[in-house]
Image: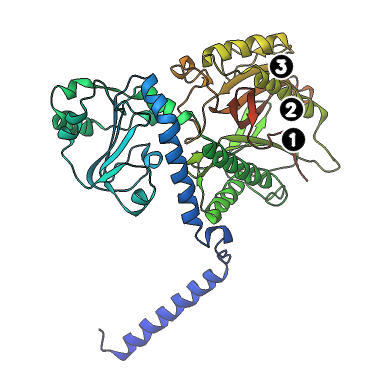
Amino acid sequence: MPTNPLIDCSLLRRLRGSLLIATAALATLPALAPPDAALTAQEARRRWERMAQIRRDKFDLVLPEAMRENDIDMWITVVREGLPDPLTEDLGGGYVGSTGYYVFTDRGDERIERVAIGVGGYRLARSRAYDRILGSADLRAFVAERDPERIGVNMSEQIGGADGLSHSSYLHLVTTLGEPYASRIVSAEKLVSDFRSRRVATEIAAFAEAGEISREIAERALSNEVIVPGATALEDVAWWMMDRLLERGLGTSFDFPSVYITGPSGIEATSSERIIQRGDLLMIDWGVEHLNFATDMKRVAYVLREGETEAPASLVHAYERGLEARAVIRRTIRAGRTAQANSDAIGEALSAAGFRPMAVFNQPYDTPTTDIMWGNHSVGNLGHGIGPSIAFFNPLRLTYEVRPTNLLSIELFAYTPVPEWDGAKVRIPLEDDAVVTERGVEWLYPPAERILLVR
């Protein structure tokens, strides 16, 4: 410590000045919002209880058929400390000290045996999803006692959510099991897709809740609650949405929300410092993570010019053409046929209804037609799910059969000429989440039906 009193006083003056500056800076910050009431009164426990119920229902009702249809006798998911599998939450989470395994065995009974080895913790034990939770066990002896012919593990070339087994974990598993079991390891790619994408009632209820939350926040974001024309930037809207997630203890499906402006030449700016102006056509593409589910949806808004009370008739017409195409798509999708067969049927139905299906994304035809590109992809635990997908960008899952309870994002882009844009086509994006039933496709919350207005 310095002993010179002049030095001490100088130091005190500098500290006092710094304190005053810091205090002034803090005074300019908005007050922290009080904890949301929904996050109090054991909300964490309620959310966990719902996820535990989903897990039990999935193990009882979906897992047996998924394993047997894919001819998998034993399914092993390997987890390591600091390296969870994409399905860790689906399977119950828990604490892993080094290496753990979720092991599911078809022993010929009505239900599938479920054992967690090297994974534990309060919530896993209390979930009542597993027959046994073993702190440790000889995995080879455990497997040999059951003697499975085909052992599925999470590795996949085309489905990221089914490719959780790392290279070192694979080598560890092969060494631990030894022969003949190491040679019986096969990809559980299709099993994982079926297990995740075939939904029980508790999942559909939870996903619908997540969808309603994402709709509410997106539609508030595209309003004067958030936007002041001439002052608010695109990124301001995106950050406002992120703050709403933070307040409610939610996650985001796709990192930062895409808040963008579309003009005659296409997308002009996305979630940037670009200031929103009157006459802008705004879009939001985003999703909410809630209860291990992730939504995917879009909304469109128009910023009124001075004197306007509604969006220009040409934009309203383009939007309504998109809604007409969506209705065609929705009534065409059927369970019981492959995603590719559904896609082919959609193309035929759109053509019959006067639309022109597109061959290449974002390359509309130089004709007066309304051109349509669709990508009705799987959705659920990820914003882009891993089940059957009626989307050109999921070639493997185009071969999968669409089944009742599959969750789909009904997504399309409608390109319609706009006279005020010298005939250039406006791209109207529509996307909302739905469930496939025996009756067809059913919405899980109110879908987009109009261009929102910012005054």
Badge 2: few (under 14), some or many (20 or more) residues near its Cα, within 10 Å?
many
Give the Cα distance between marks 2 and 1: 7 Å
Q: Residue at x 34, y 54 (%)?
A: 122
Q: Amino acid at mark 3?
A: Thr
Q: Residue at x 57, y 14 (%)?
A: 343
Question: Which residue matches tag 3?
Answer: 370
- Which comes sooner in the sequence, label 3 or label 1? 3
- Kindly indicate whether the residue at mark 1 contacts the one at mark 2 (C-beta within 8 angstroms): yes
For this orientation, the residue located farthest to the front is 109
Give the Cα distance between marks 3 and 1: 18 Å
Image coords of residue 125 (percent x, y): 33, 50
Q: Quadrant of the N terminus?
A: bottom left
SS of the residue under disc 1: loop
Give the Cα distance between marks 2 and 3: 11 Å
Residue 162 lies in quadrant: top left
Which mark is on residue 245?
Answer: none
SS of the residue under disc 3: loop
For this orientation, the residue located farthest to the bottom is 5
User: In the image, is residue 132 above or below residue 170?
Assistant: below
Which mark is on residue 451?
Answer: 1
Question: Which residue matches tag 2?
Answer: 319
Q: Residue at x 41, y 39 (%)?
A: 90
Image coords of residue 214 (percent x, y): 60, 43
